[in-house]
Image: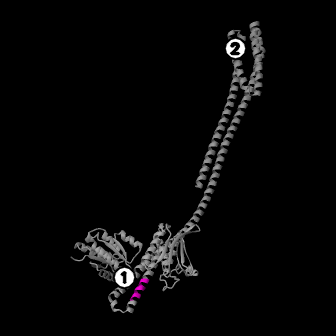
Amino acid sequence: MRIANRIGAFLLAVALAVLVLMIVAIRSDQATDDRLDIEAARIADTADTARNALSALKDAETGQRGFLITGKESYLAPYYDGLRAFDENAARLRRLTADDPELSAALSRVLALADLKRGEMAFGIEGLRSKGREAAAGQVSEDAGKIYMDEIRTRVDRILSAEEVARARNAAASARLKAYSRAKTLLGAAALFTLTLLGAVFLSIEIRYERRLAASLEASERKYRELAESLEQQVEARTRELKRLNAELGAFSYSVSHDLRAPLRSIDGFSQIFLEDYGASLDENGRQLMERIRLAAARMGGLIHSLLDLARVTRQDLKRVRVSISEIAASALRGLAAATPERRVRTIVAPAMEADADPQLIRIVLDNLISNAWKFTSKTPDAVIEVGRMFREGKIVFFVRDNGAGFDPALASRLFTPFQRLHPESEFEGTGIGLATVQRIIERHGGAVWAESRPGGGATFSFALS
Amino acid sequence: MTAPSLLLVEDNPDDIALAQRAVARGGVQANLVVARSGKEAWDMLNASARLQQQPKAVFLDLNMPEWSGFDLLERVRAGGPIATVPMIVLTTSNEPADVERSYKLGANSFITKPLDFKEFADVFAIMSAYWAGINETI
């Protein structure tokens, strides 16, 4: 891109320079030629006119002499024609030499001589007419007219030769001018050539530099691409590994769900059938032993169920929609009340509580927190469970509060660790996985969960979603 | 008149025994016929269709060798004389993905086997009685 731009700009500059130089050279040559042509024409014209004037004066002289010799008036016609032609040419010469003072002065002197010659010729004609042929002939033999005429011819020749010199000078000047013009053109061409050469050199340097720059750029790009590719490959490999691990976890969960629960169901089912079929022939102790087997199986079933929940909240996709916290809480409390109709618990659920959350997962959260509250108030007379909402640091915080057994605040951080129990199993049954599941769900929502309590003073579990 | 038949597709002998016990315990008036794989169930269903003695309903497990429950569901619902037989998935799984896939393939119901035998027996007896009797009321 950069190279192409520079080449383009350079070629344009060269083209413009060529155009300008050509125009200048042509115009200058033309002007020079025109000027030289005009000058040459003027010199030639001057010389011709001078010759014509001389020739006209000779014609007039010839006529006059013919008249003087013959005395016939008819010879005077060429005399008058010659004089007229001389006057015309003289006038023309004056105009042609007006710009040249030297030539003009020389011409004036010739014309003065011509006036003398004309006076001599007129005198001869008058003499013939008034005194007769002999007197006039004597005049001719005196040769005054020839002296004038020779002088005129000499002067005109001198002028003409001067003009020849001028013409030669002019030709030399013209040659010089043309040589100068050619030199100018040559110089222009040379300048153009040098410019082009410089441009080519500059361009080649530029291109070489650009190439080197491009090569180094390409090299660094290649390096980064390779780096990025290797990074990408690493990320891909890790992602593949994670996906594989996740799939394995899924398969493991499924196998735990199916393969561990099936024998449990058998243990429970056959012990129940055993009790139904042979219970009558067992004593009380035998029946109690069977019941303990069944209870253990049920507890293990609960554990498996909780573990599956915990695994599921980790890998299940989050689908956040508007959910009614109030309704889910009320439904959980209704379920617990139906399952343990002997319990008398006062429940308070704040109305119209809503949140953007995964409906399935937020139900697991509320089920866990509310069933915990239900469980830990089992030994509290006048048990109260409250599900409500408050604002803290600009955030909506939901809470489940009870007036049950509570826990030691120093141990609060251990609450959310899997299989951590703060109460002995004999006192309050449970798997120790519920709160870990709650925390994982809230964290997947980008929120936080925490608990506050003191022993015997009830507990408050709060959570905020992002 | 013979009692209506129900087809149980199940590979776990314990579960077969528990299901049989549940039917007997609940006093359901139906013959519980057992197929031990999806393929066997497919053959039995086609044979019963030829004899015009189709079961009133099929209870099928999902995780089985030689055709899973999904495979059987897909083939039965693909067309033919047995395409409309009621199919009830009876499984250990409670995975949402399994529930969704079962219904999409044309299951009439999805039951997660309860761990507690009393619960399982109650549910199975109720479902059996319902599907065994439903066609007679139509």
| Chain under disc 2 | A
Q: Nearer the viewer, mark 2 or mark 1?
A: 1
Q: Residue B22, can we see it?
A: yes
**Mark 2 vs mark 1, CA separation in Å:** 166 Å
Question: Label 2: which residue?
Answer: A80
Above or below, B30 against A320 in this view is below
Query: Is residue B91 inside the magenta stretch?
Result: no
Instruction: Please provide percent x and percent y for residue B87.
Output: 32, 72
Please tell me which residue lies in front, A411 or B80. A411
The count of marks equals 2
SS at mark 1 in the image: helix
Percent coordinates x, y for residue B73 in the rendering:
33, 72
Residue A365 seen in the figure? no
B10 horizontally vs A328: left or right? left
Residue A278, by quadrant, is bottom left
Tell me which segment is drawn in magenta: A290-299
Look at the numbered disc 2 and give the secondary structure of its residue.
Answer: helix
Question: In the rendered image, which quarter is residue A68 located in?
Answer: top right
Give the quarter of the figure containing the N terminus of chain A: bottom right
Q: Nearer the viewer, residue A48 or B77?
A: B77
Q: Percent from the top left, x then y, of residue B88? A: 33, 73
Mark 2 neighbour density, 10 Å: few (under 14) some (14–19) many (20 or more) = some
Assign the C terminus of chain A to one quadrant of the image. Answer: bottom right
Check disc 2 and give the amino acid type. Tyr
* Residue A297 among magenta residues: yes
Q: Which residue is mark 1?
A: B117
- Residue under the point 64% across and 48% down: A193
Q: Position of residue A326 (x, y in %)?
A: 48, 69
Q: Residue furthest front?
A: A382
Q: Residue at x 61, y 58 (%)?
A: A210
In the image, is B68 to the left or to the right of A347? left
